[in-house]
Amino acid sequence: MFSLPKLLVLALIIAGVIAAFRVAGTVRRLRADAARRQATARPPAKTEELLKCSGCGAYVPLDSPDPCGRGDCPRRPERS
């Protein structure tokens, strides 16, 4: 009725099912952690377009009324 090969196959099947449930649990936990990290992530920083000042080489915001903010700068930024 019960032979050793049949019991070994049954044990392997049970071990395989247990391993599959463990892997599925790990994958589910990793996905939940990734979703939580993504939900709490900071939004991307606001970016501005910059222009290079032709006189001193400093980069200034495109909509800035000042040339570059340096008192010794001889020119206004280039508009390209």
Image (cartoon, rainbow, N blue to C red):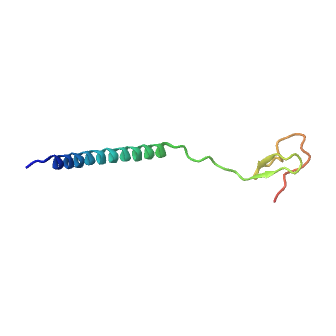
Q: Residue furthest left?
A: 1
Q: Decide which of 24, 1 is in the foreground and name it.
A: 1
Q: Is residue 69 above or below residue 49?
A: above
Residue 39 screen position, x and y as percent: 47, 45
What residue is drawn where x is 36% and y is 44%?
A: 26
Q: Decide which of 38, 1 is in the foreground and name it.
A: 1
Q: Is residue 48 left or right of residue 44?
A: right
Image quarter (top left, top right, bottom left or bottom right) of the C terminus: bottom right
Q: Decide which of 1, 37 is in the foreground and name it.
A: 1
Residue 52 screen position, x and y as percent: 81, 51
What residue is drawn where x is 92% and y is 46%?
A: 74
- Report which quarter residue 34 is drawn in: top left
Q: Residue furthest front?
A: 4
Question: Exactly how many numbered labels are in the figure?
Answer: 0
Q: Residue furthest top?
A: 71
Q: Is residue 69 left or right of residue 20?
A: right
What residue is drawn where x is 89% and y is 44%?
A: 73
Q: Residue furthest bottom?
A: 80
- Report which quarter residue 15 is drawn in: top left
Q: Is residue 78 left or right of residue 25?
A: right
What residue is drawn where x is 23% and y is 49%?
A: 13
